[in-house]
Image: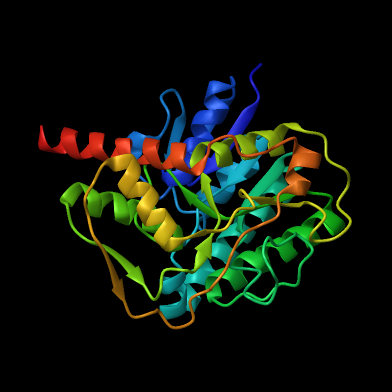
Amino acid sequence: MARRALITGGAGFIGSHVAGRFAANGYDVTVLDNLSSGKREQVPAGATFHHLDITSPDAAALVRDGRFDVICHLAAQIDVRKSVADPAFDAKTNIVGTLNLLEAVRASGARTRFIFSSTGGAIYGDLVEPPTSETAPKDPQSPYGTAKLSVEYYMGYYARIHGLDTVALRYSNVYGPRQDPHGEAGVVAIFCGRLLDGAPLTVFGDGRQTRDYVYAGDVARANFLAATVDLPPATGVDSRAFNIGTGIETDVLTLANMLRKVSGGESAVTHAPPRPGEQLRSAVAIDKAARVLGWRPEVTLEQGLRETYQWFAAQREEAGA
């Protein structure tokens, strides 16, 4: 009998890649998504789809009765700017919605591994020299980062008191095919669109702010490994947390020039005033993921940017056909 995986947010950018990875490895895949940003056509063929919100009683019932071997929880409010504008909505989705699922796992009595998609950029802040390890001090600068870290502490509680099998994957800036231009990592999708339009690439400030860009396919593989490897018991909130990135800082100007190279585009780079409060440097240390999960990124930034640009170009061509 095939093992069963539930992917929340599985119609979205990263979630659809994760769902596809489990389906390709013979899992019986169920996708839960409210389609607020996800797209039904991105759900892998053969997966069972439920149009539900993670805060709903129906979502809890699905988790409680489904007896899944693994739940990859990617459904979330992902926009840092929206979290600043409406922190209560962010908390309702990212904290209360996740608690709804964790309570359902507890009530099910099943030995389900619950893998939470956290953030490796928004919880560490600017106080630590990159690349940042999992045990570095946490200093989230936004309600979004605060909510993600809060969920990790809740998972520590559920592991300690109720024996739940929980894992947190702290992503750096994920990019790749199907990406929407939201959040900081959305710069790749935005630049691809500008290049296809022949429009200038806008860089805020001097363009020297850095991020750690990791390809969506590598993130999907990290989820699969986190679901399948044997892990030691939890001994604290950081013990079952893994940074998923490259450990490499890439500044925005370098990113723009690499995309111009792989696309063959002639778009100029223009500068706009810096954005107040923007994190200046970010990259995560990935030694622990390599040592415990057996995971390292396989797609170079240039290769990933080329594949991402080609995907956007194909989408544009299909839309115009």
Q: Furthest-top residue in view?
A: 1
Which residue is painted at 80% across and 41% down in the image?
Answer: 291
Name the side, left or right, on which 43 lies relative to 227: left
How many discs appear?
A: 0
Q: Nearer the viewer, residue 21 or 314?
A: 314
Which residue is painted at 45% across and 41% down in the image?
Answer: 302
Q: In this orientation, does residue 111 appear?
A: no
Q: Is residue 60 above or below residue 296?
A: below
Quadrant into which the N terminus falls: top right
Q: In this orientation, does residue 95 appear?
A: yes
Residue 65 horizontal/vertical position (percent): 63, 39
Q: Nearer the viewer, residue 192 or 240?
A: 192
Residue 109 placement: quadrant: top right
What colouring style does the render use? rainbow
Which residue is painted at 53% across and 25% down in the image?
Answer: 23
Quadrant into which the C terminus falls: top left
Name the side, left or right, on which 85 lies relative to 174: left
Q: Is residue 2 above or below residue 133?
A: above
Which residue is painted at 72% across and 39% down in the image?
Answer: 112
Q: Furthest-bottom residue in view?
A: 276
Q: Is residue 275 above or below residue 19?
A: below
Residue 122 horizontal/vertical position (percent): 58, 67
Residue 7 placement: quadrant: top right
Q: Nearer the viewer, residue 248 or 217?
A: 248
Q: Furthest-left residue in view?
A: 321
Residue 255 horizontal/vertical position (percent): 42, 54
Residue 41 horizontal/vertical position (percent): 32, 35
